Image (spheres, helix red, strand yellow):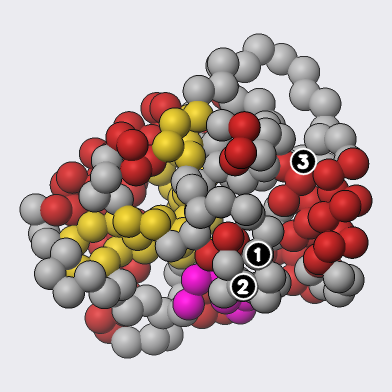
Amino acid sequence: MRPIAELRAEALKATPPEEQGDFLATDLVELTKLDPTIRLDIRYATANNFLGAPVYTQARAFLQRPAAESLVRVNQKLHTLGLGLLVFDGYRPWYVTRIFWDATPANLHNYVANPSRGSNHNRGCAVDLTLFDLKTGKPLPMPSGYDEMGERAHSDYRGGTADERANRELLRRAMETEGFRVYEFEWWHFDHKDCQRYRIVNVPFEKL
């Protein structure tokens, strides 16, 4: 909708919403330091994303420690099936959520979080990911691509091939065993059960 550099400048000057209540202390940990076998494809550090421009300066992924430890357990269970987790995104500073919202047309706002409420990514408890084959290193086919804004991305989409739907459901079941829940509009987005116990965070990767 507008130049990314312009949106970034505005977002960096903006202030996240104030939150009242008791929250757990922020303890963001880097996923690959807990489990080096988790693979990363941090699209927002590249131009290969829905904005067509990088918004992160570093290709890293963080989660609050309980969510990160749960994800490690999911990954280890999948290894017994010859599969692993490929992570697209984890913790996301609030200012990036503001960029996404301002850059996205109103009719597609179901696919981006409203910065006035913040995102579970901002709380460090949401992760975007898929499955990959440990032998080939290739991602498993899914009904849509990552960050696709349309019906094919929905977690209950009935189209696509039988293999694509089976892979999507395998990912969902694996994540649910460790307290994650899929977002209805995005098969790749999972929220940890403790999301609302953490505050919105706006710390850039460089300071973590």
- The answer to whether the residues at label 2 and label 1 have Cβ atoms under 8 Å apart is yes
User: Where in the figure is residue 6, as x and y percent of width and height?
Assistant: 89, 61
- Which callout, 2 or 1, points at the residue further toward the start of the chain? 2
User: Where in the figure is residue 141, as x and y percent of width and height?
Assistant: 32, 79
- According to the image, label 1 marks what residue? 54
- Residue 145 is labelled as none
Q: Quick one: SS at disc 1?
A: loop
Amino acid of disc 3: Arg
Query: Quick check: is 147 in the magenta stretch?
Result: yes
Q: Main secondary structure of the magenta part?
A: loop
Looking at the picture, does residue 186 appear above or below residue 208?
A: below
- According to the image, label 3 marks what residue? 117
User: Where in the figure is residue 100, as x and y percent of width and height?
Assistant: 74, 60
Instruction: Give the side of residue 17 with respect to residue 41, left or right.
Output: right
User: Where in the figure is residue 46, as x and y percent of width and height?
Assistant: 58, 67
Residue 107 seen? yes
Please provide the residue range marked out in magenta: 145-150
Q: Quick one: SS at disc 2?
A: loop
**For the residues marked 1 and 3, what is the alpha-carbon distance in whole angstroms?**
24 Å
- Which callout, 1 or 3, points at the residue further toward the start of the chain? 1
Instruction: Name the residue located 50 percent from the left edge and 29 percent from the top edge.
Output: 28
Q: Nearer the viewer, residue 193 or 73?
A: 73
